[in-house]
Image (cartoon, rainbow, N blue to C red):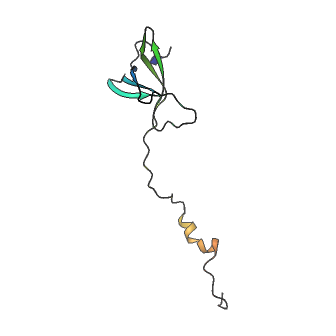
């Protein structure tokens, strides 16, 4: 057994009710000196975690609602919010050579080159 699945594990969850939609369970989780309330739901293949942890719950013998928590994949760190604008990909060299790359404005017919 790994450290997180031993009966004296420091990461323990108590399942106390089902979620409103019946797809998961509400839990109280004790870890690292904190008590947290949350929900667990089955992982869906192809669905992103979106900053959530992927965990396995190991029921303790004789106490099916008390589980040791094994973190399979920790939550990803928060990312900076998108600015809502496209990425700036044009370099100064690209801008300086725009005419050479795409041709400048066309001269009127009959004008000297």
Does 12 appear above or below 77? above
Q: Is residue 2 left or right of residue 109?
A: left
Front residue of this view, candidates 43 and 16: 16
Which image quadrant: the C terminus? Answer: bottom right
Say whether residue 37 is left or right of residue 41. Answer: left
Q: Residue at x 45, y 18 (%)?
A: 4
Viewer-proximal residue, 104 or 25?
25
Look at 45% across and 51% down and name the residue there.
82
Q: Position of residue 112 (x, y in %)?
A: 65, 90
When asked about the image quadrant of residue 34, the answer is top left
Q: Is residue 83 above or below residue 18?
A: below
Percent position of residue 71, x then y:
47, 25
Residue 8, horizontal then vertical, whole percent: 40, 13
Which of the 4 image quadrants contains residue 36? top left
x, y percentage for residue 73? 50, 30
Q: Quadrant of residue 22?
A: top left
């Amino acid at each position: 057994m790994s450290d997180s699945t031993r009966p004296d594990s420091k990461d323990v969850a108590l399942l106390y009710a089902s979620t409103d939609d019946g797809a998961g369970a509400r839990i109280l989780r004790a870890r690292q000196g904190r008590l947290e309330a949350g929900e667990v739901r089955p992982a869906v293949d192809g669905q992103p975690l979106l900053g959530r942890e992927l965990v396995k719950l190991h029921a303790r013998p004789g106490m099916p609602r008390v589980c040791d928590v094994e973190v399979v994949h920790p939550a990803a760190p928060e990312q900076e919010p998108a600015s809502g604008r496209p990425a700036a990909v044009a370099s100064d060299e690209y801008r300086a050579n725009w005419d050479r790359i795409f041709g400048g404005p066309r001269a009127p017919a009959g004008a000297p080159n």
